[in-house]
Amino acid sequence: MSFTADRLLLFGATGDLAQRMLLPSLFALDADRLLASDLKIIGTARSSLSDSEFRNFARAALEKFLPAERRGQMAGFLNRLSYQTLDATKREGYDELARKVGKPGRGLAIFLSTAPSLFGPTIAGLAAAGLTGESVRMCLEKPLGSDLASSRAINDAVAGAFPESRIFRIDHYLGKETVQNLLALRFANLMFEPLWNAAHIDHVQITVAETVGLEGRVAFYDDAGALRDMVQNHMLQLLALVAMEPPAHFDATAVRDEKVKVLRALRRVGAGETVTGQYRAGAINGSPVPGYDEELGKPSETETFVAIKAHVDNWRWKGVPFYLRTGKRLPKRVTEIIIQFACVPHSIFAGKGATMQPNRLVIGIQPEENITLSLMAKVPGLDREGIRLRQVPLNIAMPDAFTGAVRRIAYERLLLDLIEGDQTLFVRRDEVEAQWEWIDAIRQQWAEEGLKPKPYPAGTWGPSAAIALAERDGVTWHE
Ligand code: BG6
């Protein structure tokens, strides 16, 4: 049912995500007059707070996390907020919560930013209090399970109260403007698509590198590790957008149908096709940082780095490796996708001594948003000693191309789509489950191989085995 919600109920309203992302995003939408004037935002969490204490809490979060240029008059936004204390595991509190939410005129959007262990009891409580009807949408934040079985259990619990058409699963990478631009690059231009296949592409690289370490998320991260924290969701979504067939329309069904086909075509990763690592003490931007085990306070076998050679087994991608790598405490924060084209079939310049390099498309997702296509060009000269060719970049810096456009937080887009009911940028159940199936097989492979993370100094590109993973195919990671 299509409706623009006039109530937004935030579970986990005092948590880290709410402070860093959700409240700032909602404020920014409000400041740009994108929220209906009657939208009320109800926060709930275990902490005991009054409405005015929650507003003060929200104000502090906005002052801390919103970029200065986007801060403004806060009073109007803060007036939308109210708060209800709730122990999500106890049924009693939900009637009170329902009273606080009041009777939505058009509809209610619920955002669960809590531990997944609370999803089941929360949904049961909401159902008992009459907060799961036809005009209610449910949005779930990751982690959506820790393997296929636990993800299915969550999906089943949610499906008990909401049909898939009212379930919104977040992968915040899909809210990033540059990630959406991948679709524009591929499907709003003629020149790439005819070449976007195994006949013309040698390999693809996807890197999501971070300089941060554990960031205090000790318990969560040590149970998850890089494979489940980053590859299962964000990296596989990027891979799916790069590899999918053109959808017939830009809508939730068409786009997600195509993504899930790619996820289901991922080949089970074989022995020797993954490398894991864990950072040790080192330096980031010249400052010393402790090792993972020191931050954690105990030895651990959790990987903070993973590199994978993946394959999509279908006609388009037959024989094209997708090299994926992600890690914490790497030398710089960068997310980028490299499309390495094949060599020209025949070099007319070979007899003149010229060497050629194949074209390469670098799609910078963050922090720099730019697209660079490397082309071969002739070095100017009379060529009396032969022709010299050199790679030159054709560079499009997105911020320059779109000056004046606001740089939005990924959650702004996602929250707006949730309130308005557009599922295109949310992950469907079959996608999440296909993602987990592939990830579970990797973990099983690790267990069979007895693979343990190799140490790497913080501030380096992971263990040397990750470099070897690509180099033995003659591929160099883009840095
Ligand atoms: C989250 C992970 O999903 O994504 C974090 O749990 C990671 O470990 C974060 O740091 C990265 O997001 P972004 O938007 O900063 O690239």
Image (tube, helix red, strand yellow):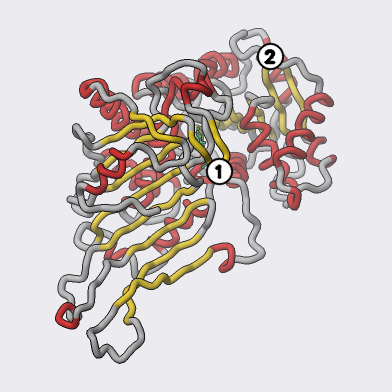
Which structural element holds mark 1? loop
Instruction: Give the camera-side residue of 446 and 173.
Output: 446
Mark seen at residue 55? none
Q: Badge 1: few (under 14), some or many (20 or more) residues near its Cα, within 10 Å? A: few
Q: Residue at x 47, y 26 (%)?
A: 292
Q: Badge 2: few (under 14), some or many (20 or more) residues near its Cα, within 10 Å? A: some
Query: Closer to the camera: disc 1 or disc 2?
Result: 1
Instruction: Give the camera-side residue of 250 and 379.
Output: 379
Mark seen at residue 286? 1
Say which quarter of the image contains residue 276.
top left
- How far separated are the C-alphas under marks 1 and 2? 54 Å
**Which label's residue is closer to the chain start, 1 or 2?**
2
> Looking at the picture, does residue 374 appear above or below residue 165?
below
Which structural element holds mark 2? helix
Q: Is residue 106 visible?
A: no
Instruction: Give the camera-side residue of 136 and 213.
Output: 213
**Where is residue 477 drawn, in percent x and y?**
33, 51
> Looking at the picture, does residue 359 appear above or below residue 245?
below
Q: Residue at x 34, y 37 (%)?
A: 463
Q: Is mark 2 within 8 Å of ligand 1?
A: no
> Looking at the picture, does residue 433 appear above or below residue 307?
above
Mark seen at residue 95? 2
Figure quadrant of the N terminus: top right
